[in-house]
Amino acid sequence: MTTVVMLVGLFGLLVPFFPGVEVIWITALAYGLVSGFGTLGGWMFALITLIGVGAMVGDNVLMLTLARQEGAAWKSLLLGFLGGLVGMVFLPPWGGLIGAPLAVYLFEYLRVKDWKQAWAALRGLALGWMTSLLVRFMLASAMVGLWLIWALNN
């Protein structure tokens, strides 16, 4: 059962706004509480936790950095976040994918009055999202791998 939930967390990362890293971490915690941590488990869980925090922080840093490199203003990115939340509430599950980029593009266009610059900001946001998805998936895979080592030696 733990393996199934871990895989749901891992492949759930492909769905925007799904907390896959958190699902993997909570599953590892539950496994430790039920099966016992032991010495190896304690170390594995500590590593899983560190990698999980890195995945969550890195995700946002990559997305924001690449969008900023393409000229997006902080206000645009904040409105993009809010647009994603609104889209997620009113058009689940894909509304966030529509609301966030639409908000960034529209605010950037209103801010700079140049559709090419607005498009560049949106492209940076999309590139940041794709890059962060790849990095998050690799780190989440490492979390699952550490849990497997722990489970096979428990």
Image (tube, rainbow, N blue to C red):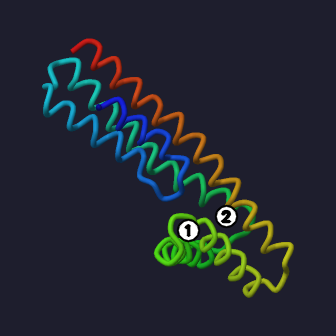
Q: Secondary structure at mark 1?
A: helix
* Residue type at numbered disc 1: Gly
Vertical side of 48 occupied by 119: above or below: below
* Residue at x 27% of width, y 19% of height: 151
Say which quadrant the C terminus sits in: top left
User: What residue is pinned by disc 2?
Assistant: 68
- Seen from this angle, which residue lies furthest top? 153
Q: Camera-side residue: 78 or 3?
A: 3
> Looking at the image, how many numbered discs can be counted on the residues?
2
Q: Secondary structure at mark 2?
A: helix
Residue 107 appears in which quarter of the rendering?
bottom right
**In the figure, is residue 68 to the left or right of 136?**
right
Query: Cα distance, mark 2 to mark 1?
Result: 20 Å
How crowded is the residue under tag 1: few (<14 C-alpha within 10 Å), some, or many (20+)? many
Circle nearer the N terminus (2, 1): 2
User: What residue is pinned by disc 1?
Assistant: 96
